Amino acid sequence: MRNPLSDKIVTIPPSGIRKFFDIVSEMKDAISLGVGEPDFDTPWHIREEGIYSLEKGRTFYTSNAGLKELKVEICRYINRRQEVAYDPDHEVMVTVGGSEAIDLALRAMLNPGDEVLIPQPSYVSYVPCTILADGQPVIIELEEKDQFKLTAEKLREKLTPKSKILILPFPNNPTGAVMGKEDLEEIAKVIEEHDLFVISDEIYSELTYEQKHVSIVAIPGMKERTVLINGFSKSYAMTGWRLGYACAPAEILKQMLKIHQFAIMCAPTTSQYAAVSALRNGDGDVEMMRESYNQRRRYLMHAFREMGLECFEPYGAFYTFPSIKRFGMSSDEFATKLLQEEKVAVVPGTAFGDCGEGYLRISYAYSLENLKEALGRIQRFIQKLEQE
């Protein structure tokens, strides 16, 4: 029998995030601090709208690009937050989570050999999706000394004549780093100088704690070069509803929509109706969840200081990225030993790129009760390491 598999697919490793949680699911009394999923229930008014849509029999396909009502609300939301206007008919589409939007954008924009600039540490799907779209990933290694921000200098170092797309993953998973307006203005100069396009993944845009999120589309000249990706999973605790969106120049969006038509047809209808309520009536829910995450963020940073664990202070998303370099172990070794000895699961920093070595991703999208128990176990684990 001939080989049934694609060589390209076989060479792509599976996500490094899942490894530990397959073990945790079968380990008694284990605590997981690794999954990037809000611990809140979807707000009731959002669920209620989904239930109502089912009761009214709204179970048919929507248009490929999504409900017009939802696209209008997306445009209003972006205009409210960033003072940037999009056309709901030609510049917005609804996707199955933000992840589909990333895949669509790369496939619609890349020709074989085009280079995609990917700052790391960052979300696990950018590199494989680039490879699947026949692009060439070019890694930009972010450093703690720069607060894990992308600098214009680092961007310039990686540019070649084949550079086409820059992925901007801010607020960042796994570091919690954010980019302010001045940071983005410096990046925008390089983008224009070198005629680049941008995929800006802003799924954590509502979860910033010391400053308001600024999108690169708000920088003059950038909207025309940017695919803005966002969704409902993190901000509205709607992970299982599988709903995201992309806003882009009509020329790009038209081709993204073509792929979406053939591969997906449309995003889930019930989820789309529920998302209308999220955007219209969900600001208070977002504020409540953000305040809770901020409380947990401060608690973790205090606990890390108490146990002598160095950690860059995150200002976005719901992750911390503490350094474990002083223990002389790899991230994978540390995480494996922590799970085996104290039954606490975290994600090795290397799951988000090689430059994540020496770090762990610890999520605080969990109750304070769970966080306190887990941190107590981590402190005990560190004390044992220091005594060895």
Image (cartoon, rainbow, N blue to C red):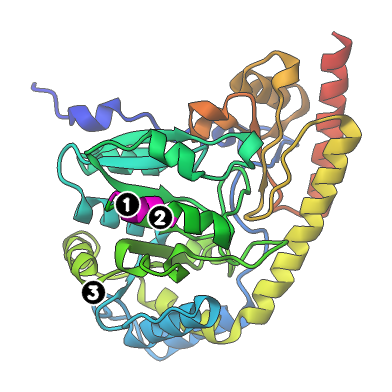
Query: Please, what is the three-letter code of the amino acid marked with disc 2?
Result: Lys
- First in sequence, mark 3 or 1: give its number: 3
Foreground residue, 343 or 125? 125
Taking the spot 91% from the left edge, 36% from the top edge, the residue there is 306
Give percent across and percent down for residue 6.
18, 31
Residue 123 in view, yes or no: no
Give percent across and percent down for residue 111.
15, 45
Taking the spot 37% from the left edge, 81% from the top edge, the residue there is 71
Mark 2 Cα within 10 Å, few/some/many (few <14, many 20+)? some
Q: In the rendered image, which quarter is residue 105 located in?
A: bottom left
Residue 127 in view, yes or no: yes
Which dot, 3 or 1, sits closer to the camera?
1
User: Which label was assigned to residue 193?
Assistant: 1
Label 3 and label 1: CA atoms lie apart by 35 Å
Q: Secondary structure at mark 3?
A: loop
Query: Please, what is the three-letter code of the amino acid marked with disc 1?
Result: Glu
> Extreme top residue here?
388
Q: Secondary structure at mark 1?
A: helix
> Extreme bottom residue here?
56
Taking the spot 70% from the left edge, 66% from the top edge, the residue there is 290
Discs 2, 1 touching: Cβ within 8 Å: yes
Mark 1 Cα within 10 Å, few/some/many (few <14, many 20+)? few
Where does label 3 land, which residue?
64
Give percent across and percent down for residue 366.
72, 52
Q: Vertically, is 135 above or below 234?
A: above
Q: Vertically, is 368 above or below 302?
A: below
